[in-house]
Amino acid sequence: MTDAAHPADVVVIGAGQAGLAAGYYLRRASVDFVILDAQQASGGAWQHAWPSLRLFSPAQYSSLPGRMMPVPADGGHPDAAHVVAYLADYEQRYRLPVVRPATVRAVRRAGPRLAVDSSAGTWHARIVVSATGTWWRPYVPHCPGIGDFRGEQLHTAGYRGSGDFRDRRVLVVGGGNSAAQILAELSQVAQTTWATLRPPRLLPDEIDGRALFDLATRRHQAAQAGQNAEGIGDLGDIVAVASVREARDRGALKSEPMFSRITPDGVAWADGSTAAFDVIVWCTGFRPALSHLAPLRLRGPGGTIPTDGTRALAEPRLHLLGYGDWTGPASATLIGAGRTARKLAAEVIAQL
């Protein structure tokens, strides 16, 4: 298989929500493009999430461009399987040119084009859109004694449900939405403790992803104008989906301060108190999955790539979509990815 066999105006890396949204607009503009996806099936990272995970917003506010997400049978916020089915339908409905499995190993400069080396061959593109997300880079902070713990440790990315934790002593670490949802589930079958850097704050029950997206957009616009604006953290940290509200109402969401070190049998706090645990669940977030871009040498402080909107400042043939607010307001969410993809596609078309 030769490099010359795979030319394309645009190569999109990743067929999750961000990659599919980009594909929608590129298809509508009749651009010559291909989407390379490392997964065996449609659905992006959602197919690897724990089954009970719920979106922050109702289906009608969690949709990609052109196709409304159907409302779940229970009328509640969609779960992970519902999102997978929606993304698979979306990909087929718009006949998006996805090649899978195609794991992209590297993006490198090759004269006037960028070469995209993958397990399915090499594509030469005029423009590359990286939309690999963050799920593949789970983050666990360094903590003294972490290697000495004799129990089980896992990250959000490895959590699959409460079945394996019945009657065990479980420490959930992290003050975000994933921690709250996992704690709510585990607290029904296990002896749970919640450790957070600061006391967690639930958003008012009526606040969900719609309001969060609007806040993120206003904050982004204000930052571009050199102004300050209210942020999500000004309202609270955690969206009160049904399972979290239920756990709150039965008193299961009480948190403890962050421990100072891990012991072979559990953790210890700065005041000398200790507790024993069988399992530590790290709900401590993710980092952008950008290793395939290493040959371009674009990373700046903090591990991100400096951009103007979605376009890399030091390599204008590269766009980044879906990694967080630094690549578009709330672009790591379904609704945010779709809105950012529209602007990205307009710029890509202008470049072509």
Image (tube, helix red, strand yellow):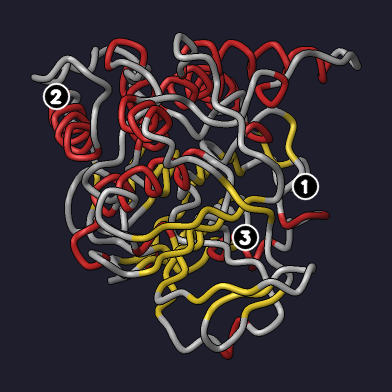
Which residue occupies 51% across, 85% down? 265
Q: Say whether disc 2 or disc 3 marks the residue closer to the N-terminus.
A: 2
Q: In the image as oriented, which residue stretches furthest toward the right?
A: 226
Q: CA distance from mark 1 to mark 2?
A: 36 Å
Mark 1 highlights which residue?
314
Q: Say whether disc 3 or disc 1 marks the residue closer to the N-terminus.
A: 3
Q: Quadrant of the C terminus?
A: top right
Check if mark 1's residue and mark 2's residue have beta carbons within 8 Å: no
Q: Residues within 10 Å of mark 1 (few under 14, many from 20)?
A: some
Mark 2 highlights which residue?
93
Q: Position of residue 84 (x, y in %)?
A: 20, 38
10 or 269, nearer to the observer = 269
Q: Residues within 10 Å of mark 3 (few under 14, many from 20)?
A: some
Q: Up-down: is 164 above or below 42?
A: below
**Comparing marks 1 and 2, which lies closer to the viewer?**
2
Q: Position of residue 248 (x, y in %)?
A: 43, 31
Q: Position of residue 231 (x, y in %)?
A: 72, 20
Q: CA distance from mark 2 to mark 3?
A: 34 Å
Q: Quadrant of the N terminus?
A: bottom left
